[in-house]
Amino acid sequence: MPANWKLICIGGLIAGTVDIGSACAIYKTNPVVILQAIAVGVLGRVSFDEGLPSAALGLLLQWGMSIVIAFFCVVANQRIAYLRHRWVSAGLAYGAITFFVMNYLVVPLSRAGEIPAFSISWFVENMLAMFLFGLIITYVTRQRAREAANEGGEC
């Protein structure tokens, strides 16, 4: 159990941090603004007026969501042999699933309340960032998922 959680946390924290950097590059802004935009989901638009405290909340939310996604990745990898043996295709699939769940379920249900405006460039840039996100998680967690599946262990 501790090995699973350690890898889940490491994978989630690395992927979440890289995702913040990707968002900075895509939107050509600094990490504080990106983190405040994440915090909008909880605080609403006032997040942008709250300075570093809302950015800190955004960082905690980003890392928390990333760790939860990594957890589900490990669980799926332990149960589906195909995913264990093909971490690249699994990572791309997780990235795509994460993209659609976050943008078309989580964001609309949050205090942000609006689906991002669609454009081809927005879609491609954000999907590529989510592919990278998924690849990081599957790369970091792949070996432990294999070991746990061979042991018959659970996440």
Image (cartoon, rainbow, N blue to C red):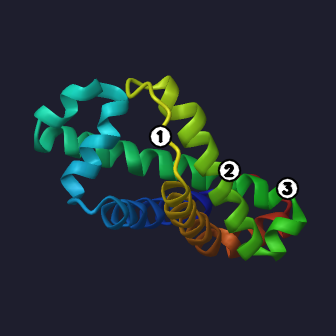
Whole-percent x, y for residue 43 in the image: 28, 26
Q: Which of marks 3 and 2 is in front?
A: 2
Whole-percent x, y for residue 144 in the image: 68, 70
SS assignment at label 3: helix
First-in-chain label (1 vs 3): 3
Res 153 seen here: no
Category of crowding for the residue at label 2, using alpha-carbon neighbours closer than 10 angstroms: few (below 14), some (14–19), many (at least 20): some
Whole-percent x, y for residue 13 in the image: 43, 61
Res 101 seen here: yes
Q: Mark 1 points at which residue?
A: 117
Identify residue type, mark 3. Arg
Q: Nearer the viewer, mark 1 or mark 3?
A: 1
Q: How far, Cα to Cα, is label 1 from label 3?
A: 36 Å
Category of crowding for the residue at label 3, using alpha-carbon neighbours closer than 10 angstroms: few (below 14), some (14–19), many (at least 20): some
**Residue at 76% over, 71% down:** 89
First-in-chain label (1 vs 2): 2
SS assignment at label 2: helix
**Residue at 27% over, 63% down:** 28
In the image, taking residue 92 as reference, residue 35 lies left or right, namely left
Category of crowding for the residue at label 1, using alpha-carbon neighbours closer than 10 angstroms: few (below 14), some (14–19), many (at least 20): few
Work out whether 60 lies above or below 40: below
In the image, taking residue 12 as reference, residue 97 lies left or right, namely right
Whole-percent x, y for residue 62 in the image: 39, 48
Identify residue type, mark 1. Ala
Q: Residue 97 carries which label?
A: 2
In the image, taking residue 152 as reference, residue 147 lies left or right, namely left
Identify residue type, mark 2. Ile
Quadrant assignment for the N terminus: bottom right
Q: Mark 3 points at which residue?
A: 79
Please tell me in which quadrant of the rendered image residue 82 appears.
bottom right
Tell me whether the residue at label 3 lies in contact with that at label 2, contact meaning CB atoms closer than 8 angstroms: no
